[in-house]
Image: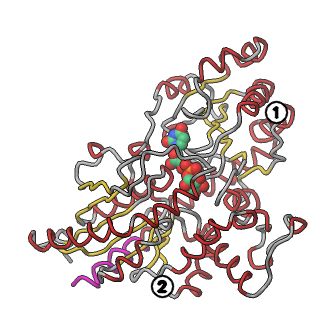
Amino acid sequence: METNRHRLILIPPPFQGHLTPMLQLATILHSKGFSITVAHAHFNSPDPSNHPNFSFLPLFYGLSHTHISSKNVVDITATLNTKCVSPIKELLIDQSEKASINHEKIACVIYDGLLYSVDGVARELEIPSMVLRTTSATNFLSYHVFVQRQSSGCLPLQDSMSLDLVPELEPLRFKDLLMFDSSAVMQQQIAKTLTVRPSLGVICNTVDFLEKESLNRLHQVYKVNFFPIGPLHMIAEEDSSRSSFVEEEYSCIGWLNNQPTKSVLYVSLGSIASWEEKELTEVAWGLANSKQKFLWVIRPGTIYDVSEWFESLPKDVRMAIGERGCIVKWAPQGEVLAHQAVGGFWSHCGWNSTLESLCEGVPIMCQPHFGDQRVNARLLSHVWKVGLEWSDIMERDEIERAVRRLMVNQEGKEMGQRAFKLKNQIKLAVQGGSSYDAFNGLVKSILSVNL
Ligand code: UDX
């Protein structure tokens, strides 16, 4: 069936970890012939020159460019949902009119799971809709379990329960759940996100075999189609950094080219999480004392000036690091993880980083910070067994020990072997397996309501 008269409107929020998978989804849908419009916030916006085949429409939500951190991300999301309704409604009405003049049709609105308010707008305008979930299916399921417990009176949770296993979600513990220690605002948002019922279903950036049980349970609860079509970055075959807000420092690839195979630990906390300045010093010491090579991303905004900070470290730690370390502001993470010199990843376990690491067979030293990251870390360490759970104590001796467990000890090598097997299984899922089938199902589903 022809798709080129079918336009899709994709609506991502202005967060790196959500915009990137949405653009990857846009890329693969475009490859099936759909016309693509990306309606994005006017700040943290994608660079249209990287995607010449898409139309980009900025939405003015009445928010100024805001520095996004783990402290304000929940409030920003709540504000976006309040403020996005009328601009998105206007945009959809306008685009529908333009589409019909061009003999096109708005075939579907695809919005990010954080923008739950779009669901009502699409429904009101009778435009078919889908939601893109950019976190793991297990994380999404955990929202449902939490709300169910809440309504059956099993909450509030006590601090003493933090290490107990959640009976419905083993091996997750209560403390792994996003809602365990979340604010009332966040709990309200989670409840709202669960009310969303997109008419055509839920797109999940995951792979069926990685989260089969969670996907089955979600399907039973929601009674809409779930399409596990991930990992999107692999299917899009497009360097995910092409939607980066910060310029990548490619010089680190040259540095990696001169390092032995699997000798380098890649250290990055993604686009929001960060360490305090005191912790950064302990990380520097821990990495130096581990005697391992490392490539470390210290994002702008984390500290004022990276080179000044490095120069301010005591001479002995700078000497101990010497040529062993390379520090950059932002790395081309796709290339870094695919590089043969990289043997481990110290990660905050954001879902994109988790998937990117799994696809390259790189084992992870897990240090979740907030949100879905604790669920991802638990999946890595206790389900797929390719992640190291460590104490998280940000002291140099503890860090040194954890780095050596991952990079030197037998334990780390075994995780690496399991990661290599997963990498191959994921490849099969993408090349004609479950993700390939799910993607074709998704395309059919959009076309079937737009005959
Ligand atoms: C956020 C949440 O924190 C995360 O838990 C959720 O799953 C998605 O939204 P973020 O914290 O940025 O995302 O983490 P992550 O999901 O890992 O996404 C970071 C992205 O930035 C990845 O695609 C990664 O490749 C990219 N990145 C990171 C770079 O390209 N260069 C870097 O130096 C660091």
At horizontal 78% and vertical 85% (from top left) the residue drawn is 153
Q: Which mark, by number, is residue 400?
A: 1
The earlier-in-sequence mark between 1 and 2 is 2
Quadrant in which residue 127 is drawn: bottom left
Mark 1 lies within 8 Å of ligand 1 (Cβ measured): no
Q: Return the x and y of residue 359 as percentages of the image width and height.
A: 55, 52
The magenta stretch spans residue 439: yes
Q: In the visual, does 225 lie left or right of 390? A: left
Mark 1 element type: helix
Residue 437 in the figure: left or right of residue 219? left
Closer-to-camera residue (387/20) = 20
Q: Nearer the viewer, residue 167 or 260?
A: 167
Disc 2 marks a residue whose amino acid type is Val
Residue segment shown in magenta: 438-451
Q: Left of 200 or right of it: where is 337?
A: right
User: What's the residue type where badge 1 is placed?
Assistant: Glu
Q: Determine crowd level at label 1: few under 14, some 14-19, many 20+ residues with C-alpha closer than 10 A.
A: many
Q: Is residue 342 left or right of residue 446?
A: right
Residue 117: x and y in percent read 44, 72
Q: Could you tell me how far apart the alpha carbons at marks 1 and 2 are, in whole angstroms? A: 47 Å
The reply to whether residue 358 is in sight is no
Disc 2 target residue? 224
Query: In the image, which is nearer the foreground, mark 1 or mark 2?
Result: 2
Say which residue appears at 65% left-offset and 42% top-offset: 345
Tell me the chief SS of the magenta region.
helix
**Residue at 51% from the left image edge and 52% from the top image edge:** 17
Q: Is residue 110 above or below residue 63?
A: below
